[in-house]
Image: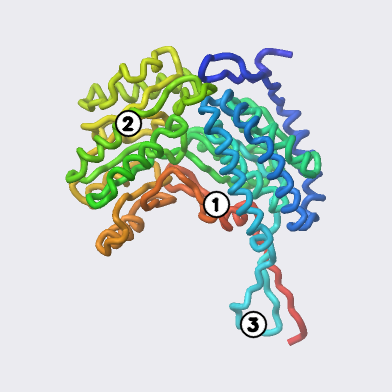
């Protein structure tokens, strides 16, 4: 066995080896896809009600194991262990919604809006067959259920390629799903290198591909899928540079508390983390003071220790990239309002990055234009809604945006409605951020992706429509 065929997962906090996994060869990947395609034929004949029953039983198993799985997740990607079980709870919330709406979404949809007599028309949703899913490390339970559970409920088989940083999470999905009664062979876990992942994307028996990750990774796999034989749909959930705008009439203390959490939770490593903030000039100083006061309260350190609220970022390379982005801003005139001695654990050569709050920033700085994916945020003063809107839309990303204002005021409500209409993002929040609701579609525009997961529309993405024409009698 060559060392190049082994994938090693390194713990972010102490750089120890968490686990090693055998990478599949291209031939082994072919075998897995063929086996999944065979298993899917029988699964497609299982009623949606029976599929829901299996997923419901699986949810109970995952819930019972969430504390142990949370500790395992913390070791793999560095989030404080006290926060990891919460991700699993959130994933189960999404699954409950998907199970609730599955039968309605997958039932034939009769069409009555036709004037043609003697016809019965319907739209049927058929599974694609085998769905390929490539997942990230930052929220492996939450992001995986978006595609995996929807795909299975819709009658598909799945080949799941997890991040090399969190491979054990994918194996926990397979183990618990099969314990709940999911037929063996329907879900395959594939640990793959980049070249073999491209072969997954291009494989003719993969009917649809889902990728969650970077813009560069999404473009590479979309190209691989397009260059492969035949045609397939591709759903891309990519990065963001998500803005927040605090209007003059916002509840400043509340907005600051919520936005610190939106920017810093999971060490800022969320695709929908708040990454830049615009504040009306009349409340700028008040907001910044509140924000800095909350940010200073974090405890940075070993994610396995009680009381630690901020763990390391995912790797030494990621920490270095974040520090360079901050240094770029400082060299161009920005000021860091968090004293360095407040977080002595954040040293060069470690993956521990201190909360960083920058002011005197502008769009010449990477901290305001390129994804940070770390606990660093720039806060910029604006004079009007128009200026805020222009700056918020000045990005090649378009995932989420949040507006903070007093919605009970009629003028502010109208202002929010206008901003929500003109913001170029897949999601707009009012007085909240960095959160998903499974009843709503999760989607991005610009370089933040294409396609949709969650909500009823997520079932549409993972099925193909079939038109059913039935003539009832001779004319």
First-in-chain label (1 vs 2):
2
In this view, which residue lies farthest toward the front?
A: 306
Please name the residue that numbered disc 3 is placed on: 116
Coordinates of residue 51 in the picture (x, y in percent) = 74, 52
Q: Which is more toward the observer, 178 or 36?
A: 178
Compute the Cα span from label 2 to label 3: 59 Å
Residue pictured at 66% horizontal, 72% vertical: 110
Crowding around mark 3 (Cα neighbors within 10 Å: few <14, some 14 to 19, many 20+) is few
Left or right relative to 145: residue 424: left
Tag 1's secondary structure?
A: loop
Query: Mark 1 against mark 3, which lies toward the viewer?
Result: 1
Specify the label residue 367 is tagged with. 2
Crowding around mark 2 (Cα neighbors within 10 Å: few <14, some 14 to 19, many 20+) is many
Which quadrant of the structure image shows residue 172? top right
Coordinates of residue 368 in the picture (x, y in percent) = 31, 35
368 over 347 or under it: above or below:
below
137 over 439 or under it: above or below:
above
Compute the Cα span from label 1 to label 2: 30 Å
Coordinates of residue 177 in the picture (x, y in percent) = 74, 41
């Amino acid at each position: 066995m060559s060392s190049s065929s082994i994938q090693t997962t390194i713990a972010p906090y102490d750089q120890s080896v968490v686990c090693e996994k055998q990478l599949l060869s291209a031939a082994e990947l072919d075998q897995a896809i063929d086996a999944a395609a065979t298993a899917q034929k029988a699964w497609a004949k299982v009623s949606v009600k029976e599929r829901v029953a299996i997923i419901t039983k699986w949810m109970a198993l995952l819930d019972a194991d969430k504390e142990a799985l949370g500790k395992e997740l913390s070791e793999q990607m560095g989030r404080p262990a006290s926060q990891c079980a919460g991700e699993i709870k959130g994933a189960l919330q999404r699954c409950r919604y998907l199970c609730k709406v599955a039968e309605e979404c997958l039932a034939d949809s009769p069409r009555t809006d036709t004037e043609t007599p003697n016809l019965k028309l319907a739209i049927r949703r058929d599974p694609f067959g085998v769905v390929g899913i490539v997942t990230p490390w930052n929220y492996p339970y939450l992001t995986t259920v978006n595609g995996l559970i929807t795909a299975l409920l819709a009658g598909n088989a799945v080949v799941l390629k997890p991040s090399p940083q969190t491979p054990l999470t994918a194996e926990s999905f397979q183990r618990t799903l099969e314990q709940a009664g999911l037929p063996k062979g329907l879900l395959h876990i594939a640990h793959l290198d980049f070249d073999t992942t491209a072969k997954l994307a291009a494989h003719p028996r993969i009917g649809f591909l889902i990728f969650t990750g970077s813009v560069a990774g999404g473009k590479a796999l979309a190209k691989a899928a397009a260059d492969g034989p035949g045609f397939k749909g591709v759903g891309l959930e990519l990065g963001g540079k998500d803005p927040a705008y605090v209007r003059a009439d916002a509840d400043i203390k509340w907005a600051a508390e919520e936005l610190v959490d939106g920017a810093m939770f999971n060490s800022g490593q969320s695709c929908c983390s708040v990454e830049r903030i615009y504040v009306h000039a009349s409340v700028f100083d008040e907001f910044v003071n509140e924000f800095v006061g909350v940010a200073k309260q974090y405890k940075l350190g070993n994610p396995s220790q009680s009381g630690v609220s901020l763990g390391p970022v995912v790797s030494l390379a990621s920490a270095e990239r974040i520090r360079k982005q901050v240094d770029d801003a400082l060299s161009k005139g920005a000021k860091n309002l968090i004293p360095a001695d407040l977080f002595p654990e954040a040293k060069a050569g470690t993956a521990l990055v201190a909360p960083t709050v920058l002011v005197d920033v502008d769009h010449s700085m990477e901290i305001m234009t390129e994804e940070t994916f770390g606990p660093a945020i720039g806060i910029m003063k604006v004079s009007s809604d128009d200026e805020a809107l222009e700056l918020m839309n000045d990005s090649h990303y378009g995932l989420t945006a949040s507006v903070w204002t007093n919605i009970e005021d009629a003028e502010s409500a109208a202002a929010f409605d206008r901003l929500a209409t003109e913001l170029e993002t897949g999601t707009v929040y009012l007085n909240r951020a960095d959160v998903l609701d499974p009843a709503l579609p999760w989607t991005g525009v610009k370089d933040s992706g294409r396609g949709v997961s969650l909500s009823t529309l997520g079932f549409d993405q993972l099925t193909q429509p079939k038109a059913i024409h039935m003539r009832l009698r001779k004319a």
